Image: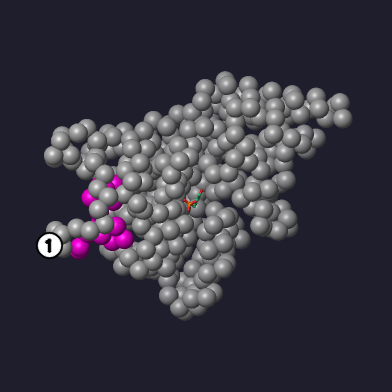
Amino acid sequence: MDTKKIGLNTICTHIGEVKDEQFKGAVSPIYMSSSYEYEDVAVKRYPRYYNTPNQAALGEKIALLEHTEAAMIFGSGMAAISHALMAFLKAGDHIVLQQTLYGGTYNFAVTQFEKYGISYSFTTGWQPEDFANELKENTKVIYIETPSNPLLTITDIEAIAKLAKSKGIVSMIDNTFASPVNQNPVDFGIDIVLHSATKYMGGHSDICAGAVAASKEHIEKIWQASICFGGSLSDQTVWLLERSLKTMGLRVKEQNKNAMVLASMLEKHDAVERVYYPGLASHPDHELAKKQMKGFGGMLSFELLETIDATAFLKALKLIKPSMSLAGVESTMLLPTKTSHSLMSAADRKAQGIKDNLIRFSVGIEEHEDILADINQAITTVTNNQVLA
Ligand SMILES: *Cc1c(COP(=O)(O)O)cnc(C)c1O
């Protein structure tokens, strides 16, 4: 099979499996061994070497999904991110990071880099010139995340990749929110693609994993660091992730569709102040999103009218779960001020446009009519209670 020509769902279903030569079973057997004959392969097989049969096969699938030469699987998104960063940074180096980042990545930067003598700057915005403004002689990595959490801002991937290339800087992107279904950053020149596979790749809120996809050369460098840091994933979970990825295309395309419908409905809703979704024409970066995304994703945020108590609204939901994390087949909502961005000062949140009544919505695969009905009943319940109180 010419793997260069096959489509998304075929890759999801067939590529990167471990053939069951012994029993001819339909799915990959799980190889849990932590000890292999040492003549087996050039680099000895060992779980922490990221090269067990299941790890290697899944790496193939993810590489093909991200249009890269190679990929590695990690124990979490943060393991993938931290191992990749530390592979390319050393004492005396500088890194430019996008202003709004996943909380764990932000926390890693502000609590870890200084200990290793690595300096860092956060951009003041998302425009390419905001990144150019922060560059220094010793900048070695530019790090972006698009669409961002929780306001779904869009960073120009191609412009950032060009900027990095022109200065010989390595570019990295956290592609978690888009998933490989909706965005392939390597096609726009990015060097290293990072994923929390806990999210859309896993998709069922039941595994924690991470992935890095890049050229063979970059993966080799990340591998050298990663065998020291030891953030590999158990083969049982590798197997579960392989199974989850078989339906990633189906799940994410359904989530794209639901999110588009719900974003449009919420935008017209009397109780809603504002909706943030890159698929809406009203989104300031809609044109850019159209250029670099194949679908607009299953994440959106919205602000309820200030007269509606957002916490009470979340409590009144019956179908949609008010829970942390995102990207599962079930719809979930949370208040960034109370969860993902609670460690940020109120002033910083205000500066980034994250209001107290902002709700982050991870759209699931339920029927959109049922999701909307739940939102409506929760709004009615809260407004009635408020009138009575
Ligand atoms: C969840 C998440 C991470 C971290 O992934 P873990 O699997 O929790 O370590 C990184 N980036 C983004 C955008 C995420 O949503």
Q: Amino acid at mark 1?
A: Glu
Q: x%, y% of residue 246? A: 33, 35
Q: Quadrant of the C terminus?
A: top right
Query: Which residue ends up furthest to the right in the rendered image?
Result: 389
Magenta stretch encompasses residue 257: no
Specify the segment rendered in magenta.
43-58
Q: Is residue 55 magenta?
A: yes
- Quarter residue 276 falls in: top right
Kindly identify the residue that appears in the image at 68 percent across and 49 percent down.
Answer: 337
Q: Quadrant of the N terminus?
A: top left
Q: Nearer the viewer, residue 352 or 389?
A: 389
Please state which of residues 75 and 129 is positioned toward the viewer in this rendering: 75
Looking at the image, can residue 258 be seen? Answer: yes
Q: As rendered, which of 248 and 5 lies closer to the eye?
A: 248
Q: Is residue 295 left or right of residue 49?
A: right
The residue labelled by disc 1 is 39
How does the figure colour the protein chain or chains? one colour
Residue at coordinates 40% horizontally, 54% vertically from top-left?
A: 75
Q: Secondary structure at mark 1?
A: loop
Q: Position of residue 226 (x, y in %)?
A: 35, 64
Quarter residue 317 falls in: top right
Residue 101 position in % (x across, y down) = 55, 55
Q: Is mark 1 within 8 Å of ligand 1?
A: no
Q: Is residue 212 visible?
A: no
Q: What residue do we see at 31% from left, 53% from top?
A: 71
Q: Considering only vertical position in the picture, is 340 above or below 385?
A: below
Left or right for 310, reference 189 = right
User: Residue at position x 32%, y 65% from top?
Assistant: 227
Tell me residue 252's x, y (percent): 43, 34
Q: Badge 1: few (under 14), some or many (20 or more) residues near its Cα, within 10 Å?
A: few
